[in-house]
Image (cartoon, rainbow, N blue to C red):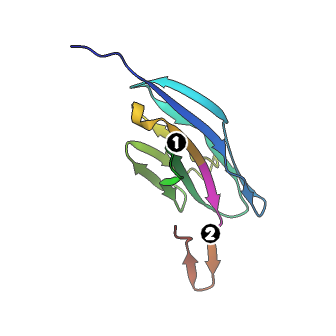
Amino acid sequence: MSSSPGLVTVMLFLLGQTRGDSVSQMDGQVTLLEGATLTVNCTYSATRYPTLFWYVQYPGEGPQLLLKATKASDKGTNKGFEATYNAKTTSFHLEKASVQESDSAVYHCALSDTVRETAGRADHKL
């Protein structure tokens, strides 16, 4: 018994900017066959090293945190998705080797400032 591969629809939107810092990702809709590789580019511009996030929003639901990276070379992984914080190329590209129909959603790339104090560092907690 064989089954036809389903389609996976991924919507991409940009989440604004904060204090002159910003993220940029491709906008629009991407439709892929199940099993295809997904790469969603996200680049950022920031005066300091920001904390970077990927959010996923499934149909009829609010945004949910998918991945987070707090420093250069951090690699976030969750549900087969991964993204590596690359400070050199100022990027945090979202990748998944084999998408499934259940991955159909809206994906948001976002950043927040990292708060630094003389005693150390405090990260924004969600």
- Relative horizontal placement of residue 57, taking residue 81 as reference (left or right): right
Q: If you read the primary sequence from the N terminus, does the residue marked by circle 2 or circle 1 appear first?
A: 1
At a point 55% along the width and 57% down the height, the residue shown is: 72
Magenta part mainly helix, strand or loop? Answer: strand
Question: Against 108, is 102 above or below?
Answer: above
At a point 56% along the width and 37% down the height, the residue shown is: 40
In the rendered image, residue 86, in percent from the top left (x then y), is placed at 57, 50
At a point 73% along the width and 56% down the height, the residue shown is: 17
Q: CA distance from mark 2 to mark 1?
A: 21 Å
* Label 2 crowd (10 A; few <14 / some 14-19 / many >=20): some
- Relative horizontal placement of residue 21, taking residue 122 as reference (left or right): right
Give residue 50's mark: none
Residue 90 seen: yes
Residue 97 seen: no
Residue at the limit of the structure toward the left, as seen here: 1
Identify the magenta region.
109-113
Q: Amino acid at mark 2?
A: Thr
In the rendered image, residue 20, in percent from the top left (x then y), is placed at 78, 60
Is residue 46 a member of the stretch shown in magenta?
A: no
Residue at the limit of the structure toward the front, as seen here: 60
- Relative horizontal placement of residue 72, taking residue 103 as reference (left or right): right
Give the quadrant of residue 24. Answer: top right
Q: Secondary structure at mark 1?
A: strand
Numbered disc total: 2
- Given residues 103 and 40, the one toward you in this image is 103
In the rendered image, residue 47, in percent from the top left (x then y), is placed at 73, 62
State the residue position of label 2.
Answer: 114
Q: Please state, as top left, top right, bottom left or bottom right, where the N terminus lies in the image.
A: top left
In the rendered image, residue 64, in percent from the top left (x then y), is placed at 49, 54
State the residue position of label 1.
Answer: 94
- Relative horizontal placement of residue 79, taking residue 54 as reference (left or right): left
Q: Amino acid at mark 1?
A: Leu
